[in-house]
Image (cartoon, grey):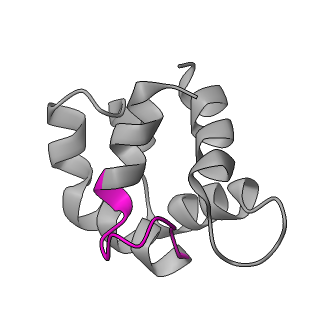
Amino acid sequence: MSDKARTLFDALDLDRDGSLTRAEVIGALRAKGPTLVARGVIPPWGVGADEEASALFDAADQNGDRVLTFEEFATVVDRRFGW
């Protein structure tokens, strides 16, 4: 798991409970996406429409419980962003 995945996960975890919901991922990418791109946390193409954020969530939710752990999240973003 990459340090970049941890940084991104922590930025998206708005309630700081150690997991991500679909609403957190969509809301945080909408609100923080440009700042995360400017800081080099994610590539510019990594911030898309709400549908793309939702698709990222679905791809990461391996056990279907509608909550992402860091491990689920990191597996997908490390691969998707080439980290």
x and y, in percent, of residue 74 in the image = 59, 40
Range drawn in magenta? 11-21
Task: Find residue 59 and report its image quarter.
Answer: bottom right
Tell me if 63 is positioned left or right of 46 in this view.
right
Above or below, 7 relative to 73: above
Q: Is residue 41 above or below residue 11?
A: above
- The verdict on residue 57 being magenta is no
Choose between 29 and 15: the one closer to the eye. 15
Task: Please give left or right for residue 16 compared with residue 21 in the image.
Answer: left
What percent of the width, then of the height, locates residue 9?
A: 42, 50
Image quarter of the N terminus = top right
In the image, what residue occupies the spot 70% across and 54% down? 60
Q: Is residue 40 visible?
A: yes
Residue 47 shows in this picture: no
Tell me where residue 82 sits by quadrant.
top right
Residue 51: x, y in percent?
Answer: 55, 67
- The image position of residue 33, as x and y in percent, is 26, 52
Question: Residue 75, relative to residue 12: is it above or below?
Answer: above
